Amino acid sequence: MEADSKQVMAGDDPIIICRDMNKWFGEFHVLRNISLEVMPQEVLVIIGPSGSGKSTFIRCINRLEEHQDGTIIVDGIELSHDVQNIAEIRRETGMVFQQFNLFPHLTVMDNITLAPMKVRHWARDKAEHRAMELLERVGIPEQAYKYPGQLSGGQQQRVAIARALAMEPKIMLFDEPTSALDPEMIKEVLDVMKELARTGMTMLVVTHEMGFAREVADRVIFMDMGRIVEQGPPENFFSDEISHHPRTQEFLDQIL
Amino acid sequence: MTDPTVDASKTIIFHAEEPPQPPSRAEVGILGWLRQNLFGSPSDTIVSVLVALLIVALTVSFLGWTVRSGNWFAIINNQRLLMMESFESIYEWRLAIVVLLAAFLTGISLAAWGQVAARLLTPLALTVIVAVSILPPLIDGGVSQPKSYFTAGNVDIIDRASTLTPQRSLAFIAAAGETVSVSLALDEVADIETLRDLSGFSDRGTNALANAANNRIEQQHAVGETFDSMLSRELTETLEERTRLNIRTFMRTNDMLASTHKFVAGMGAELTQGDVAIEKLRWWLVRLKEAARTTEPNVDAILDAAVPLEDGIRNLSVSRALPIYLHDSFAALTSATLASEQLEELGELLVLHLSEDLIGKPAQRDDEEKLINPSAREAAFLRDMFVRLLTPQSVLELYQLGQTPMQVAIRDARSLETLADGVLSAAGDQVTFTIPRDGWYIFSKNAAEGHRGSAILAAYGIHPIIERTLSPTESRYVRVNDDALVVTAARPQVDGSNIPYVALIDNQFRGLRDFPTFLIHFIPSFFRQVEALLPFFITVVWGFVFGRIMAHLLGKQSAFDEPLNRLVVLAWALAPLLVLLAYFAIVAGGGLSEVARVALQLAAAFGLVELARRCEAWLIRNYPGEDAEGSLNRPLLYSWAAFPLVMYVMASGVGGLSGAALGGGLAGLLWLLAMRFIGLLYRGGLAGAALLAGGFFLPLLGGHIINLVWPGWVTEPLSSLGLWLGLVALGLLAGHLGELLRSHLPLSVKRAGYLLGWLAIFFTVLDTNTLAGEGMASLLAALAFALWMGWMFFGGALQWNSNRIIIGLLLLTFLWLQTWTLLDRASSALFIVWLAVGAYEFRRGELGQGAYKSRKRPAGGLLRGLGSSPQLGLALVFLLWLAALVLVPSLVTGLEAQGILQTSAADLLPLSDKRLWGGLMLTMQLTILGVGASFPIGVALALGRRSSLPVVKTACILYIEAVRGVPLITVLFMATLLVPLIDPTLATIEGAVRAWVGITMFSAAYLAENVRGGLQSIGRGQMEAAQAIGLSTWQTTLHILLPQALRAVIPALVGQFISLFKDTSLVYIVGLAEILGIAQRVVAQPEYLQRRQETFLYVAIIFFVFSYLMSYISRKVEATGSGAVRAEYL
């Protein structure tokens, strides 16, 4: 159903291209020869055991981590040491963190409007108007003038999503967005993400929510030991009939 | 009883509907609080009671001291010295403006930050105003001034070694309508107790007499005690032993003592003739000491008295006479042996007394017992004898006080004509006179013709005076007791020499005060000083009302839907100012009776309070706004941040600041306001350009137009019209170019364009050296201007990062240090700032973004609300322009002509002499300027220390560690003593400025570490989140890291500020007199010698009030914004 509502254009160029990407933390080889292409409007779910490099990988895409080898091209801009390029890529990429990372000293409204006003130089009226739209979209317009400290975890994460969306990014990166939440709050955040996927946002989601992956993902990637072990559409990936890489099978056996 | 027919299992049991009982009265309210907190357990109770007793005891003794003996004249009469030392009195109005500004900001701050204080403010202000209005007239009318005492007569009064001759004539000052009356102080000299307890201003003679009375009473007491101790077991045994073994020895020693004294007396006679031989004296001294050791009870006194004499004659030739300078020592010894003489008499008495009972029957045991335990009657008799013999003659008998008729007169000081006179000889006699006019009078007193003797006179209406020297030739005389009457006329003279006046130093207050005297002496004068602060109180209230209204308006736009509302609200907001102005206009107009003045003050006070209450109630009812105060935070913080600069400029003046520049600055301010309007009315560039141009030209044009009508009225119209035109055009061009570059061109072209544009501005400004004078200052100003312009127009696109900015700032600081003359270029700099701020405003207005910071209003602010109605907005803009047209040129040059301020227009704020700064003013200057300057430096250092650039980082670490490793005193000494050695030209900088720089440097290093601590407490996630949404490093620091870091370390920062405030007292080591230094000076004044407690207590209170204020404000600021939920979140 979801696949019907959005149209993945086959002829488009990939919006993210990674080629032979490597990264070390000191001696530790975190990411090994990652090569991946993400098409516009594609929803990519990355799963894998802890320490497999999932988070590091998506953090490399907006340069929160620096890769040491290989190429990353986002929306036609190559990620290099050029500060201007990094700034432009960050403008096109929204990110949602496991720990929300809202700015505690600003109200929800200021959290959301800060970047559009400072980076995109929007007028305050425009930014606030847009922020209210986004808050309505994530279902908490009434919280606009509260401080993050006054919100529940689920609400905070939805604000974080709204904050990321306020920059009107082309790509959204989710780094385990539901891991720090209580079970009943997970649903409200996932609903927002599903809705976002339906509208055709390009999304890279690191998560342990297999239900979400099965329902929303266009492609599921399994990572282990810094490598992409296996990838495929969710119906194949979660199917028992298709034979999996032994490591994938082991992982799937444990979580399903 | 259970009913057996009812099945218990099926019965529904209804509980009787008991209404819930409210907690008993003993558990809630004050009683409950007391029970819980003070009397919770037996041990609690004991501690509470003990502490309460302690508090009561301390309070009672403190209040007792305050009322009965504290000499508060030391403070009241030195208030100006303590506040501002000898700051030029012609510039005092500038300080007043600073304090008024602070009061206004305080009022707004209270409205925004201090909920509890806000509730307290109204009653507090009311109380102060009512107290100021009512208390002084009430006390002045209801309590009479106590008497002053003067000795009179033709007999000298001996005070220890000196002789006091009662003055024949004394000059005093009195106010018209007061009554002066003089009578004999007979009640006071009834006996020595009343003489001792005499209370009032007393001259030296009276004081000496009362002291003598006191000595006599004390001696009687001491001698009685000596006798009592002689009756104690030990001494009695001695006596008993003596009696038993050899009463003859006792008699013989008595003989010897008698002969000793006789010898001394004889010697004294010889001495006065001047030819006693040293040899003889030595022999005599040996004998005297021997005799004393064997017999004297007060042997120590005699031996002590002998020491100086022995030392004195040790090296003298044996045959010469006793030198004059040793006569005093000899006299002291003589008086010490007086006791011996009396003891001799006592010995005889004892012998007489005892021989009756003892000597006749020496062997009988009973009688010995009797001696050991004399009967009460015997003891009383002996004691009385002993005391009477051992104490000096009463001064009452000696001088026969009050038994001689006295001739007194009040004379006019100029004509010396006698206004009232009479002879006082009995209790009812009195000379009374009503003073016709303020000024000097002469009080003459002497023994009546043909009589010889002394008297103490009690006078009403003659009070001590202190002289305040304004310059070597000019003095003013202030009456001490009420601090109200000030006479500037010179002291009266007779036969070419000044008549002594009733100086405080000779007429100190003697004895313990009663409560009415305390009231009349200190309360009116205290409140008169408070009354001088009344404008500041009223301004606080005004600021408070204004703040409440602004807060509500900023929070709610709906209040502006009705044009009528706007006007009403505006009128209400401004009403207190009008009340204030009206009040001063009326008071200054004069001719007001005391009653009318009080009524007016009360009306103003109640009116203000009522206004505030109604206004707030109305707003809350009609326009409820949540967190309305929050909207005030930012403008308030900016205002306070700008305060130090205002303070410095106002206090010190600005060298070379021409009236034109000042007018330009004011015009700029007005223009800025206008921009606020126009930014809302029109978004188009054309209107902005028109306004920009208008803002500059109207004042210029206005000056010329005014000159056309009244030639020469504006003597200094702003010059260089062409230059201004060029600059305006440049600003407009830059603005539009920036827009064009931002939206239409590729990045590389943009960058090239930015660079070229920046360079063009830089060199243009550099070239027009008229802007900033010559040389380095010009370069610097141009650089600053260009930087600012570049920042404003292209800031978003140029990739600034913090390191570059820090390097830039360091460079600027360096340049600035190189060119102290910059200050002299302030006038030019002011124009530049004006222009730059204008450009900034222009861009914001044109972009229509961010200029009107608001949280939840589509349109914000009073002005903007007004502007939302185009007609009204236009009308206001027009009015503002009109105001600029009239005000600016008149401010520039018309002031002198108008006589508003008695200063030259071309030099409106001349430099004050910083060497004359002192007192609280200097303390506050050093504190506020120190805080104001060290805060940005500290933050910059903290950021620098975290920088990734090794040079910047190392420099910051070196600075911080070096400064933190040195005591503040060393830094101050270096700033004061060492710096001039390095470069002699620096020695011309005033000490106050150098101390300020030293304190700032010192404080900045500590602040840097505090801020760094705050920065480190912020999690990595915040930085990552900020980067992820695309903020640059600089934006992240400014908007994410610093606000959180600073908020986290508010307690530490304020602690640092408080310690800076207290550390300013150290500057007295380098010769500056801040308030503690002045206090030292006050206690060194001869009038207030040994009056340290009052002065230092006062200084301590001042220090405490300001320190507490700082920590209170810090708590309030902590609780603003996210601070309210911070604890919850973390």
Image (cartoon, coloured by chain):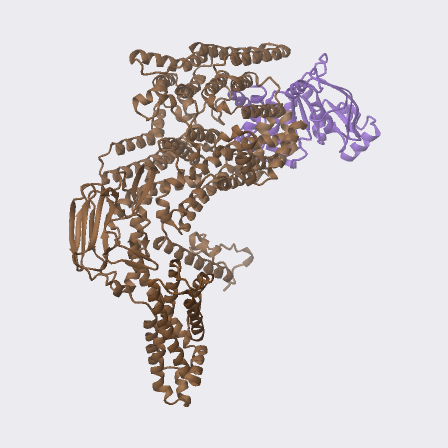
Of residue B464 and residue B13, the one placed in the foreground of this image is B464
Tell me the residue at 23%/52% (across/down). B459
Could you say which quadrant of the image residue B612 lies in? top left
| Residue A138 location (% of width, % of height) | 59, 27
Q: How many marks?
A: 0
| Left or right placement of residue B430 versus residue A190 in this view | left
| Residue A216 location (% of width, % of height) | 69, 25
The reply to whether residue B678 is in sight is: yes
Q: As displayed, is residue B687 above or below residue B216? A: above
| Left or right placement of residue B78 versus residue B45 in this view | left
| Residue B572 location (% of width, % of height) | 34, 30
Could you say which quadrant of the image residue A37 lies in? top right
Chain in purple on the image = A
Q: Quadrant of the C terminus of chain B?
A: top right
The reply to whether residue B1022 is in sight is: no
| Left or right placement of residue A175 versus residue B146 in this view | right
Q: As displayed, is residue B364 above or below residue A153? A: below
| Left or right placement of residue B786 versus residue B362 in this view | right
| Residue A221 location (% of width, % of height) | 76, 25
Palette colour of chain B: brown
Of residue B1117 and residue B16, the one placed in the foreground of this image is B1117
